[in-house]
Image (cartoon, rainbow, N blue to C red):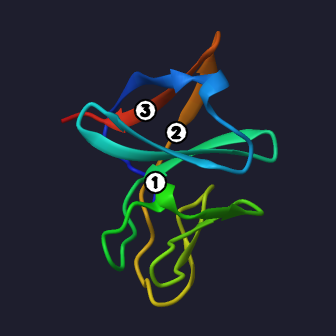
Amino acid sequence: MTTSAPATWSVACPLRDLVDEQALGIVVADVAVCLVRTGGQVYAVHDECTHASIPLSEGEVDDGTVECWLHGSRFDLATGAVLNLPATEPVATYPVRIVGDDVEIALPAP
């Protein structure tokens, strides 16, 4: 599920802070975000499992997905789609761009 409201671009972190195949939890404009660098791309999803409100940034990253460590729900980083139970709702995704040495994400306008 991609956010559809008008967006505001915000600096999330320096690109050097992202380690390949590892999730990084940050807060941007009071929104918890899970950033992942994998396969040469950077993805941003809401940092909360839709099943049990666990930070996805504490989970495992594998092949373009992130897995919640508590019950094993897995989400596609590009689309937010649920790939296995117990979660049934997708996680919100946020557009990402690299500007200079920074990662920027677009969050819905308040």
Binning the other alpha carbons within 10 Å of mark 1 as few (below 14), some (14 to 19) or many (20 upward) gives some
Chain-order first, disc 1 or disc 2: 1
Residue beneath the point at 54% across and 82% down: 72
The answer for how far apart the CA atoms under marks 2 and 3 are is: 5 Å
Considering only vertical position in the picture, is 75 above or below 98?
below
Label 1 vs label 2: CA separation?
A: 8 Å
Q: How many marks?
A: 3
Mark toward the start of the polypeptide (3 vs 1): 1
* Residue for badge 2: 95
Helix, strand or loop at label 2? It is: loop
What is the crowding at mark 3: few (fewer than 14 residues within 10 Å), some, or many (at least 20)? many
Are circles 1 and 2 on residues that touch, CB within 8 Å? yes
Q: Earlier in the sequence, mark 2 or mark 3?
A: 2
Q: Residue at x 42, y 57 (%)?
A: 92
Q: Are marks 2 and 3 in contact (CB under 8 Å)?
A: yes
Q: Amino acid at mark 2?
A: Pro
Residue type of the residue flagged with mark 3? Ala
Q: CA distance from mark 3 to mark 1?
A: 11 Å
**Residue identified by numbered label 1:** 2
Tell which residue pokes out farthest to the top in this image.
100
Q: Secondary structure at mark 3?
A: strand
- Specify the quadrant of the image occupied by residue 54: bottom left
Residue 106 circle label: 3
- The picture places residue 41, in percent across and down from the top left corner, at 73, 40
Q: Tell me the residue at 58%/60% (across/down).
A: 79
- The picture quadrant where one finds residue 99 is top right
